[in-house]
Image (cartoon, rainbow, N blue to C red):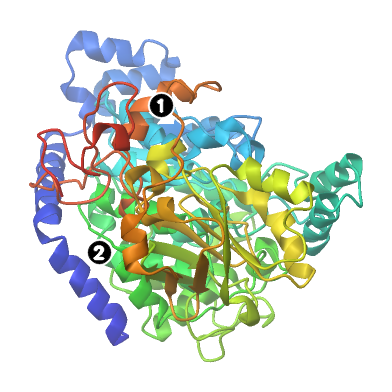
Amino acid sequence: MNPVIQDVTDRIIERSATSRAAYLARIRRDGEAARAKGPARAHLGCANLAHGFAGAPADDKLVLRGVGNNAAKPGVAIVTSYNDMLSAHQPYETYPPELKAAVRKAGGVAQVAGGVPAMCDGITQGRPGMELSLYSRDVIAMAAAIALSHDMFDASLLLGVCDKIVPGLFIGALHFGHLPAIFVPAGPMTSGLPNKVKARTRQLFAEGKVGRQELLDAEAKSYHSPGTCTFYGTANSNQALMEVMGLHLPGSTFVNPHTELRHALTEAAGRRAVEITAHGSEYTPIGELVDEKAIVNACVALLATGGSTNHTIHLVAMAAAAGIVLTWDDFARLSGVVPSLTKIYPNGQADVNHFRDAGGMQVLIGDLLDEGLLHGDVMTVAGPGLDRYREAPELVDGELVWAPVTGGSSDLDVLRPVAAPFSPDGGIHMLSGNLGRAVSKVSAVKPEHLVIEAPAKVFDDQLELLRAFEAGELDGQDFVAVIRYQGPSANGMPELHKLTPPLAVLLDRGQRVAIVTDGRMSGASGKVPAAIHLSPEAADGGPIALVRDGDPIRLDSAAGTLELRVPAEELARRAPQGRPLSDAQWVGTGRELFAAFRRMAGHAEQGAGIFGVSGAESPDHGPGLGFLAEAGASHLETGAPVGAQHAGLAR
């Protein structure tokens, strides 16, 4: 193993020792009980069980009742994010009957246990609904827990693709960590309008050079059919991480929907779910599979592929669900030794289909394993060891088989080996300085834009910046746009992707511009230099609330620094400016239903969630710890320390 990879892993293991041990003790007790007692449903009371099979088809009803030899057949939960509004989730319409048939053939019985919400950040960008997006991750986790709470099941099949859906399902499944779980992907849509053309059309629209119809035509040619959007944003980063963590079947990530191979892989996932229950010989509970090595593997894959910055938040929260404490310092150390190996839009012009055709996950994983940058000795749903993920699926005479991929990349413009990377370090850098800590995605930023020092232009809402651009107030000047009160406890930490086209226009005109924000940028955001996820946020009294128009700010993504060039004694005299919307103002589009999330959300650096570390014995142990406040009160209004918890204990 690379010594830095090993050292980071060892530090995570040491840091997480107490919480991880407590988590494992709990799920192992549940697992031992499951192995000893047989299928979970067999131990329900008669009335309980009757409710559980009342609506089942006749053949399944016999299995669920346990008539004859059926008593030993395991039950498999299908938890689905299907809806037909979102292209990525539309293919899931046909998955339940396919999976039920495959599970039945393998000797089990499957039921749709529940659904989880799946919202689209692409639709809600710049809209009030985006302010619910990050919160939806924890809602999805809770919805998944409700689906699995019936004690009817011995494994789960999780159907989810995009943004918050996969992290939410992941967190929910880990709270039933004694159950095996397999993520079943739907695959990307086929390639449409080239990403370079789409991005250029967006900029032309921002400049007023093309109209709405031309822009809509371009967008419709890009997002044109069922399947995941083909750029490498959060959705496809999710899919890559599930494969490198061993939660997909090998090679299943980027197979297009509605193909014979996709159908065969879906059936195989159903069969495999039966094989890895506690009642077979390959028991693989998700809580054991997701260990410290698997989490480090996910971080390495994210950095090597220049994946979505959203995962610097999600992976912290996902690890916490398994009792593992992951920090931004871990990302920073890993980024120093993990090279950038892919060029997929927005970090390049290729899409995920081109990446797959160049060798895809199998070549990437194989090379990272050979170079000691991934842990190979891990559990996966396909069996022990990550070497299985060097194999690619194919159909031979109608039968699904896996064959080793022994060659390297077939397109070095898209996928390169560790020996000849696009960049020697990872595509995501961590920044720190007197403004706090932040994340910067550098993989798509030109080297000459990695460092900027310019006066601040301060906005408390992204619409203010858009209005300033449209009025020409940003023309002909260098500046750092500071967009604050956009964090988890202010308004749900919306993505600010709508700001990318206008700022890209200014960048192309020769102006030096950048973004500093306590909000998020889309996983699709690219060439504009940005310091995002700034923590602590303005709503929690972070230094960003002290910034004034004209203050010099230096953003150095190469050195990993973010500095407000104002004397400390001057800052000490300043009072915060601006404030987040009150609960009375933060209404509409259902936002008022989520006021409690604003009061309980943890810092971005801690996962920006409302859950603590699974197994933590101390209430101040880790991410996502909230505190009780009066209804309608913000963090600042209560005066409570950020993250202080119910008993009044501060971190």
| 426 w.r.t. 525: above or below | below
Mark 1: which amino acid? Phe
**What residue appears at the point 75 percent right and 63 percent down from the top-left corner?**
506
For this orientation, the residue located farthest to the top is 47
> Please, what secondary structure does the residue beneath circle 1 have?
helix
Q: 55 and 463: which one is in front?
A: 463
Judge whether residue 604 can be spotted in this image. Answer: yes
43 left or right, relative to 409: left
Instruction: Identify which residue is drawn at 90% across, 45% down.
Output: 214
State which quadrant residue 126 falls in. top right
Within 10 Å of the Cα at label 1, are there few (<14), some (14-19), or many (20+) other Cα atoms? some
Q: CA distance from mark 2 to mark 1?
A: 32 Å
**Residue 58 drawn at (x, y percent):** 43, 15
Give the mark, 2 or 1, whose residue is nearer the N terminus: 2
Q: Are marks 2 and 1 in contact (CB under 8 Å)?
A: no
Look at mark 2 in the image and give the residue it sits on: 292
| Residue at x-position 58% and y-position 31% | 128
Can residue 427 be seen here? The reply is no
Residue drawn at point x = 51 percent, y = 51 percent: 520
- Above or below residue 242? Residue 640 is above
Q: Which of the pair 596/243 is nearer the observer?
A: 596
Residue 208: horizontal and vertical position, in percent? Answer: 88, 49
> What crowding class fits label 2: few (fewer than 14 Cα within 10 Å), some (14-19), or many (20 or more)?
many
* Badge number at residue 130: none
The secondary element bearing badge 2 is classed as helix
Mark sitting on residue 594: 1
Q: Foreground residue, 199 or 485?
A: 485
Name the spot of residue 192 as percent of width and height, x first: 80, 54
